[in-house]
Amino acid sequence: MYIVTNRTVDESKHTENEAFGSKPIEGPNELRLAEASRRRNRWHIDILPDQITPQMARSVDLNPDNIYPASAYVARKLIEKPDQGTGARPNGRNLLLFVHGYNNDMTDVLDRAERLEQNFGVEVIVFSWPANGGGLHGVLSYKSDKRDALASVGAFNRVLEKLEALVSDFHAQYVIDLEARAEARFADNAAAWDRYFAKEVEKHCPFTVNLMLHSMGNYLYKHLLGSSVYSGDRLLFDNVVMVAADTNNENHAEWVDRIPYRNRLYITINENDGALKASRLKMGEQQKARLGHYLRRLDSRVATYIDFTSQPHVGDSHAYFEDSPLKNAKVLDFFKASLNGKVAEKPTRYDPSRNVHRL
């Protein structure tokens, strides 16, 4: 599993809560990459160097005499190293960028990402921002994490830029070669040219890239969309899944409708979400109804709203994509489809009076 972070790091440490700090890296929008693996039921962390070693280059079939950034190594491990020339990723899994929420230390983050991989068959890349409450608790912790989310906007923008560049570079040369083959075979038949091209692209790259934002991770994305650093033209993700969004319901369409995606933009709602009810109380009257637990004013023109309220096993869960809620086959099927870039609302019942799909 790979982590991209704007937390402070200690390259000499290899446990998750020593290798990663609880404060942002000093410097404008700096990022570090790390590799996490299970060893004897504990996490082992390797903070990747900014420039990879010759040994690392050889391990992913790069020229060891050249200089490569850590992102090139991760790209080869995740995307670019094909399976026996077919172009497919070695394990065939779809990619999921996971952005966690409030009050998460690195053990929480990695354990949750591992469950996402196990439950839904995806390859998770984690963006981890400093969401530990600064060692505080309660209201002060919540406010501290909101400040850290705002401070992480530029870093998150760079994550999207880098991921887009990796995926684009992966496609670029293959597309050039494929266009030449299509032209040689079907120069005089545009329809056949298009069919051949589409079929070959699907064979070469049969995976989707999706984004899951949980809780305050949605607050971070909201402020990125309104930031001057955001370019707004990255059609990177097939599905964007906003789970239990800890951000205002009021006027959410103004920024949600700016989110680019290829297939679906899902917003999940649980009116009984205990964590979101608590987050309103933490900020007193200033904290308005949260998007993830409010079934009114669902007025985005592009989002598909999914209501999990009162579903068996969901209860007051804030993370109904894991543990007991997955005993409900409807819940399991929704997340399995949505996090893999598929259409997930077909089995639901649409309520036009609320503009919401009910499981």
Image (spheres, helix red, strand yellow):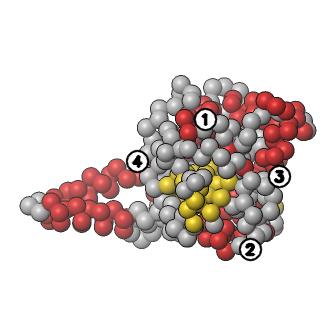
* Image coordinates for residue 23, horizontal then vertical, percent: 78, 34
Q: Is residue 18 left or right of residue 217?
A: right
Q: Disc 4 residue type?
A: Asp
Along the line of sight, the residue nearer the viewer: 264 or 46: 264
Q: Disc 1 residue type?
A: Asn
Quarter of image, res 183: bottom left
Kindly identify which residue carries mark 3.
274
Mark nearer the N terminus (3 vs 2): 3
Mark nearer the N terminus (3 vs 4): 4
Q: Disc 2 residue type?
A: Lys
The span from disc 3 to disc 4 (Cα, nearest Å) is 43 Å
Q: Is residue 215 above or below residue 88?
A: above
Mark nearer the N terminus (2 vs 4): 4
The span from disc 3 to disc 2 (Cα, nearest Å) is 19 Å
* Image coordinates for residue 64, horizontal then vertical, percent: 49, 49
Mark nearer the N terminus (2 vs 1): 1
Disc 3 to disc 2: CB gap under 8 Å: no
Disc 2 to disc 4: CB gap under 8 Å: no
